[in-house]
Amino acid sequence: MTRRFRSTQTRPWDRGHEFGSAHVEQVGASVAAYQRLFDRAAGSAVDLDRWGTLALERITAAAPALADEIAGIADGAGLSVAAVAAINARTEVLAAVSATSPSECTTVVRLRDGAPPVSVQAWDWFAELADLWLVWEIPHESGHVTTTVTEYGIVGKIGVNDRGLGVHFNILHHTGDGNGIGVPVHVLARAVLDESRDLNHALVRLAQAEVSASTSLTLVASTGGESAAVSVELNPGGVGYALPEPDGLLVHTNHFLSSPANLHDRELRDGPDTVIRFDLLRRRLSGRPDVDAPAVVEAMTSHLLGGGATCCHVDPALPASARFETLATVSLDVENGTLTAHSGGPCTIPADFAAPTKENTVLKLKRIDNMDILTRDVDALVEFYHGVLGLPFHLPYEKDEEWAAIDMGNVTLYIFKSEVGEHAPRRTAINPDNAPGYDSIAFEVDSLDEAEAALDGRVEWVDERIQWKHPSGTWYQYRPFFDPDGNMLYVTEPHIVGAGA
């Protein structure tokens, strides 16, 4: 079963606290599982606080918003910040405490003329963590959304944003790995999705990162009918790039494809199955104009290499430290900013994976973009919303054109001229007293006292101050008022449980 969680909080600490509070058991289990993995890899007890403290310093310097989010997760889950920071640096800690660490993942991207890119990954990892991952949908204050397949307590991994960018994640091994703690690669994957305006912005962000554990982050971009893909091979010695073949096919497993990093590749000795997986998929998919997501999944359905196959299953004869399986198969829809994640390997996936029909497609709505008010006097409402309430124009206001666009923060209010019929009756602050239909707009303020003082004498109040409390502890205080046409608005001071810090 694939679990999904959509955050309602948009500020980093608040979002983290909400996530940690909602997943106390799972985040705790993730920390405990990684403590066992680290201890087993090192052959002795690993000081989680020490490594987590080092990791948090690097995260704070490289991505302060995600450091805040990690602190929120820890607080919500009742754990130390260092413990949650340590699992966000799980790749770096494993590299630092062990001469060898496991391989994971097979990525396939196919660029197609006149069609969105195909973008599929099989994520292989320790079988004991099979129940400790989810799909996390992350709205931001800007209105943008990041969606990531990740582990509980870790801020990101494989994912996509709604600006035409996706990221795949393959671990690599370089002879220079393990020297202290660099910028955690999981944090980088999430930061790229959160921050990047375009593909170039993402490339620059990754190229400037100093890492201590090698990883390939395959970037896939699609916008305006164009698409591109590149595997960014991060390593302590620098960065390298692998590009698609002339037919648009890009395959990445767990060895370096770029030079000079390939001259320092440990995987060719410790995990040579990577080269067979790479060759198998290139042979199965090269030169095929019909490649779509189901075709890639079919090509990935190979058990030739057993525990090192593209579709990996647990070998019960092996010790726990060597029991790996394909935990998830993920398809990115970069053009639409969504992803499909299937729990299990390619051989367990239904035939319609990543190819939903129109009948079973669920519409993905984003933030509210705009709303309209019709009025007989555009200028009077402009004077009220812009002059009295102090809201800026979204677009320049030309009085003679008889319309205006007001920037209300997350929403644009369009005001249009109309002389047809009568205005709807005024609303009251008592919902059962009002007819069904549009009711009001509410503006958040830091202090209701200050808002009332600023508006008193300049607006017509509908009612006295109102307070409402929810059993969860969340409460609001607010006061309604009319604009010149009698449309009802509120100023509201929210107090959300878990918010702030």
Image (cartoon, rainbow, N blue to C red):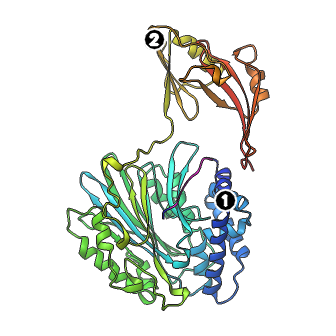
Q: Position of residue 225 (x, y in %)?
A: 30, 47
Q: CA distance from mark 2 to mark 1?
A: 49 Å
Residue sitting at the far front:
432
Left or right: residue 163 versus residue 384 is left
Q: Residue at x 62, y 86 (%)?
A: 40
Disc 1 packing (10 Å; few <14; some 14–19; many ≥20): many
| Left or right: 211, with 451 as reference point | left
- Residue at the image point whose x is 45% and y is 11% from the top: 418
Q: Which residue is mark 1?
A: 20
Q: Is residue 459 above or below residue 451?
A: above
Read off the magenta span: 3-10
Q: Amino acid at mark 2?
A: Ser
272 versus 413 height, above or below: below
Going from N to C along the chain, the mark reached first, 2 or 1, is 1
Residue 350 part of the magenta-drawn span? no
Amino acid type at mark 1? Gly
Please name the predominant secondary structure of the magenta segment in the image: loop
Q: Residue furthest bottom?
A: 317
Image mark for residue 199: none
Please indicate, yes or no, whether residue 103 appears anywhere in the rendered image: no
Say left or right for 116 vs 159.
left
Left or right? Give the position of 114 relative to 27: left
Quadrant of res 483: top right
The residue that mark 2 highlights is 418
Q: Position of residue 417 (x, y in %)?
A: 46, 13
Residue 489 in the image: x percent, y percent?
64, 23
- Residue at (37% x, 65% y) in the render: 120
Task: Identify which residue, 30 or 114, lies in the foreground.
Answer: 30
Question: Mark 1: which secondary structure?
Answer: helix
Q: In terms of secondary structure, where does tag 2 sit?
A: loop
